[in-house]
Image: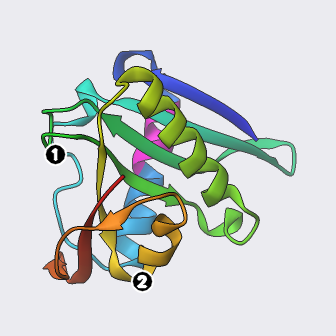
Amino acid sequence: MDWQWQSFVQISSSDLYEVLAARQKVFLLEQKCLYLDMDGLDQGAHHLLGWSNVDGKRRLAAYLRCLAPGTKFPEMSLGRVLTTAGSRGAGVGLELMGKGIAYAQQQHPGHRIRISAQVYLERFYAGFGFESVSTPYDEDGILHVDMLR
């Protein structure tokens, strides 16, 4: 895996296309959620892109964005967390979250991290020290829970 942290302006147009296509495939098509993915927060975020080599071609395997405290929540947040279908089950998601948390703590030491987690992934995020701080709620047709680390 080739991991890259980039600000929005550092992402090339072809890489941005890959990110937005992956977000659509995972969140809109696979999970059947109709929502406005382009929420105006990408421009101020830091983006973690995980690339793999598949049949000699560079492919996006994983992605998340990190938002500074006060941007979406009082705490910093990690969101739009995804692994592409071909990358699941190989530990890529574990590596993605580990790198995301480490970067967030480096960028904003002493701040907590808030995520809006799909309920079925609650145990996954708990493994990284996140604790549920809300009751489940419906977001775009999928049950979510707020979690803090």
Q: How many numbered marks does the figure carry?
A: 2
| Quadrant assignment for the N terminus | top right
- Colour scheme of the picture: rainbow
SS class of the residue under badge 1? loop
What residue do we see at 13% from left, 33% from top? 70
Q: 117 or 139: which is nearer to us?
A: 117
Residue 114 at x, y percent in the picture: 27, 51
Is the residue marked by circle 2 packed among few (<14), some (14-19), or many (20+) residues within 10 Å? few
Residue 109 at x, y percent in the picture: 37, 25
Residue 14 at x, y percent in the picture: 51, 31
147 above or below 2? below
Q: Is residue 141 left or right of residue 85?
A: left
Q: 128 or 93: which is nearer to us?
A: 128
Q: Amino acid at mark 2?
A: Tyr
Residues drawn in magenta:
15-20
Residue 136 at x, y percent in the picture: 20, 82
Q: Which residue is mark 2?
A: 120
Task: State yes or no: residue 80 in magenta.
Answer: no
Q: Which residue is mark 1?
A: 39
What residue do we see at 37% from left, 78% from top? 31
